Amino acid sequence: MERTNKMYLNVKDPESYKYDVIDLNNGMKIPGVQEANDETGEFTIIMKDLDGNWIKSEIDLIEFKFKGNIKLVRKEN
């Protein structure tokens, strides 16, 4: 995977499908990331259940905000 100097990405960005968010502590892709800032390490995940369905409260999707050692990485073609 090619590293990038892109610091912030939101899934609403038309280029977001070209990037993965990587946990630099274990080298693994973080699934379900909706937005990420690799300068601050903050990222938001919307959770799925075991069947792959989005977990919802009565009105909204359930999201969790984290801070970690992350990097936005451009996917290889």
Image (cartoon, rainbow, N blue to C red):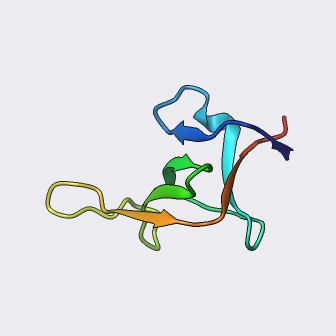
Residue 57 in the image: state x and y as whole percent: 20, 64
Residue 21, compared with residue 67, is above or below; it is: above
Residue 75, compared with residue 24, is above or below; it is: above
Question: Would residue 42 appear left or right of 76 to someone viewing this image?
Answer: left
- Looking at this view, is 70 or 46 the one in front? 70
Question: Would residue 63 appear left or right of 42 to someone viewing this image?
Answer: left
Q: Is residue 47 visible?
A: no
Number of numbered labels in the structure image: 0
At 81% from the left and 43% from the top, the residue drawn is 3
- Looking at this view, is 37 or 46 the one in front? 37
- Looking at this view, is 16 or 68 the one in front? 68
At 61% from the left and 28% from the top, the residue drawn is 15
Residue farthest along the front direction in this orientation: 40
Residue 15, compared with residue 75, is above or below; it is: above
Q: Is residue 63 visible?
A: yes
Residue farthest along the left direction in this orientation: 58
At 77% from the left and 38% from the top, the residue drawn is 4
Question: Would residue 74 appear left or right of 59 to someone viewing this image?
Answer: right
Residue 24 in the image: state x and y as whole percent: 74, 65
At 58% from the left and 66% from the top, the residue drawn is 68
Residue 33 in the image: state x and y as whole percent: 52, 54
Location of residue 18 (image quadrant): top right
Question: Would residue 76 appear left or right of 33 to someone viewing this image?
Answer: right
Location of residue 58 (image quadrant): bottom left
Q: Which image quarter is the C terminus in? A: top right
